[in-house]
Amino acid sequence: MNTPAPNIAKGAIETDAVIIGAGPVGLFAVFELGLLDLKAHVIDILDKPGGQCIELYPDKPIYDIPGIPVINGLELAERLMTQVKPFHPAFHLGQSANALTKLADGRWQISTDAGTKIAAPVIVIAAGAGTFVAKRPHVDNVAEYEGKSVFYAVRDKEQFRGKDVLIAGGGDSALDWTLDLAPIAKNLTLVHHRDGFRASAHGVNQMRALVAEKKIGFEVAQVTALHGKNGMLAAVTLSAPGKPDRRHACNVFMPFFGLTIKLGPIAEFGLNLHEDQIPVDTAKFESATPGIFAIGDINYYPGKLKLILCGFHEAALMAQAAFHIARPGEKLRFQYTTSSTSLHKKLGVA
Ligand SMILES: Cc1cc2nc3c(=O)[nH]c(=O)nc-3n(C[C@H](O)[C@H](O)[C@H](O)COP(=O)(O)OP(=O)(O)OC[C@H]3O[C@@H](n4cnc5c(N)ncnc54)[C@H](O)[C@@H]3O)c2cc1C
């Protein structure tokens, strides 16, 4: 016997559309839905909007955004955020959309790992290739310390105030957080397996200046063991070629060894998948499950190109179809932003 669909959870947020993924395509979906008066809540596991553009290539130039000859990943994300401002989207950042439930009233409910529950008639999956997962260090028992004294991301830097912090890595994240946390931490040491960095020269120079002023430490070494109790670190073992291993006291260890991408919890949503992507029809960008749309890198259809501009087109068509689900029976009038006074009002330019 099938279990009956549940009612909306107590305290759940109710809205028109939930967008999973605040990458460029998810952000533009906020705009397209907003033009049709559909309010969106956006969830992203990252602590800032921008998706791959911010996480993988913030300073790389993009040359194929129509009408913008060149723009880097960071600027594109910032401009999209400006563009969606009139629609006041609600962002739930640093949260993973973990479960999708069909409700008794026909709507959908998304639950996040932070306990947020949002019910809506329309779910827009704009999750790119999935969630960015931090590469773990090769040390025993690391799982025991994760989330307690080993962190792969900074959600609130205040939690590191007055702590003995050890950061490992040689890329921009390691260097950026070294510079950001140096004034907050009691002691901060950066370790990297070589005295050369992938990070920007500017960040490296700033880090070296802090080392010269003895405000932070830098060591060429690798963390090879963790020591502590109940998930709370007391020290790590640092190993360097040609030197004896030594203990380094610290109560926070932050390895920044890069990210891999995995589809993550969306794989368990019960949707049809084609090689970890969601097949959609190209008239609406709706999946085979009514009310669940998929746009951007996450979707699959013949001829699909994983380009930002294709995702923008998909967002526009998705919004038209989503309107009829969110506002059944209401008429949708096609309007241009150049000439529609009602759109100008929504955009705050009237
Ligand atoms: C190095 C590089 C250069 C590129 N250059 C170009 C270029 O020049 N031009 C171009 O058009 N494209 C380029 N691309 C591709 C482009 O970045 C992607 O097509 C685009 O980012 C797709 O946008 P999206 O919004 O669909 O997904 P993404 O940008 O991947 O964003 C998806 C978001 O969903 C979030 N997410 C996933 N699962 C969950 C979950 N369960 N819960 C919460 N959040 C979740 C992720 O954290 C992520 O922030 C480039 C890509 C790379 C890697």
Image (tube, rainbow, N blue to C red):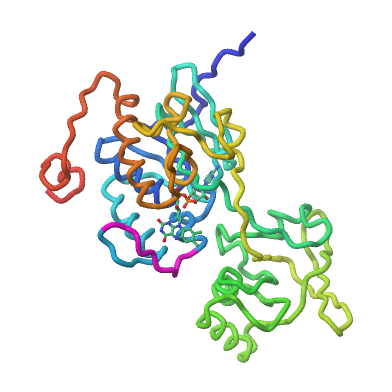
The total of numbered circles placed on residues is 0
Q: Nearer the viewer, residue 310 or 80?
A: 310
Residue pictured at 56% horizontal, 57% vertical? 155
Residue pictured at 60% horizontal, 87% vertical? 208
Q: Nearer the viewer, residue 71 or 240?
A: 71
Residue pictured at 25% horizontal, 60% vertical? 67
In percent of width and height, residue 48 lies at 47, 56
In the rendered image, residue 3 lying in the magenta stretch gets the answer no
Dividing the picture into quarters, in which one does residue 41 lie?
A: top left
Dividing the picture into quarters, in which one does residue 199 lie?
A: bottom right
Q: Main secondary structure of the magenta part?
A: loop
In percent of width and height, residue 287 lies at 46, 30
User: Vertical placement of 220 versus 288: above or below?
Assistant: below
Q: Residue furthest front?
A: 303
In percent of width and height, residue 15 lies at 38, 32
Q: Residue furthest right?
A: 244
In the rendered image, residue 63 lying in the magenta stretch gets the answer yes
Side of 12 relative to 172 (left or right): left
Give the magenta-colored segment's residue range.
57-66
